[in-house]
Image: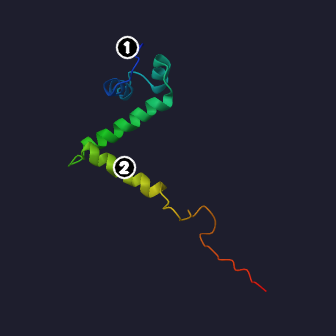
Amino acid sequence: MEDDIKRWTATRKAALVMEIIQGKTTVVQASRSFDLPPSDIEEWGDDAKKGIENALRAKPLEVKEQSERQLKELQEVHFVPQGHQSRTQGSGTTRATHQSHD
C-alpha cells in the first residue's frame, strides 16, 4: 500500500483490513506506517466484521435496513423519553410536597 495516503476511501480501508486479517501487517505496524490512531484501524476492522456477517446471512440486509436496525437498537439502549428519569438518576419515584397554609 502507499505510505502517503491523503484520503482513506472505503477501498483503501478494506485493503488495509484485509492485510491485517491475512497477517501481512498488524494494527500497530499499520498505525505507525500510516500515522493513524490504532482505534481508527480497529474500528474499520469492526465495521468490516459487521459487513462480512451481513454478507453471509441467508438473506442479507440492505444497507439502509441494516443502518435503520442499528439506529433503532442504539435508541432503545440509550434513549430516555423526555420527562422520564433514568433508573440511574435517583430512586425512580416522585413525591409531591405539600405546604400547609395556616
Q: Quadrant of the C terminus?
A: bottom right
Q: Which residue is mark 1?
A: 2
Residue appearing at x 40%, y 38% in the figure: 46
Q: Earlier in the sequence, mark 2 or mark 1?
A: 1
- Residue 10: give x, y in percent of width and height: 33, 28
Q: Is residue 62 above or below residue 77?
A: above
Q: Is residue 16 above or below residue 86?
A: above
Numbered mark located on residue 14 in the image: none
Q: Secondary structure at mark 2?
A: helix
Would residue 1 be found to the left or right of residue 35 on screen? left
Q: CA distance from mark 2 to mark 1?
A: 33 Å
User: Picture quarter containing residue 41?
Assistant: top left
Q: How is the image coloured?
A: rainbow
- Residue 81: give x, y in percent of width and height: 48, 62
- Residue 89: give x, y in percent of width and height: 61, 62
Judge the density around disc 1: few (<14), some (14-19), many (≥20) Cα neighbours within 10 Å. Answer: few
Residue type (three-letter) at the residue carrying disc 2: Gln
Task: Choose between 92 and 44: the one closer to the eye.
Answer: 92
Judge the density around disc 2: few (<14), some (14-19), many (≥20) Cα neighbours within 10 Å. Answer: few
Numbered mark located on residue 70 in the image: 2
- Residue 51: give x, y in percent of width and height: 31, 39
Q: Is residue 29 above or below residue 76?
A: above
Q: Is residue 4 above or below residue 75?
A: above
Tally of marks: 2
**Residue, far left:** 59
**Residue, far front:** 102
Residue appearing at x 47%, y 17% in the figure: 33
User: Picture quarter containing residue 25?
Assistant: top left
Would residue 21 be found to the left or right of residue 92 on screen? left
Q: Quadrant of the N terminus?
A: top left
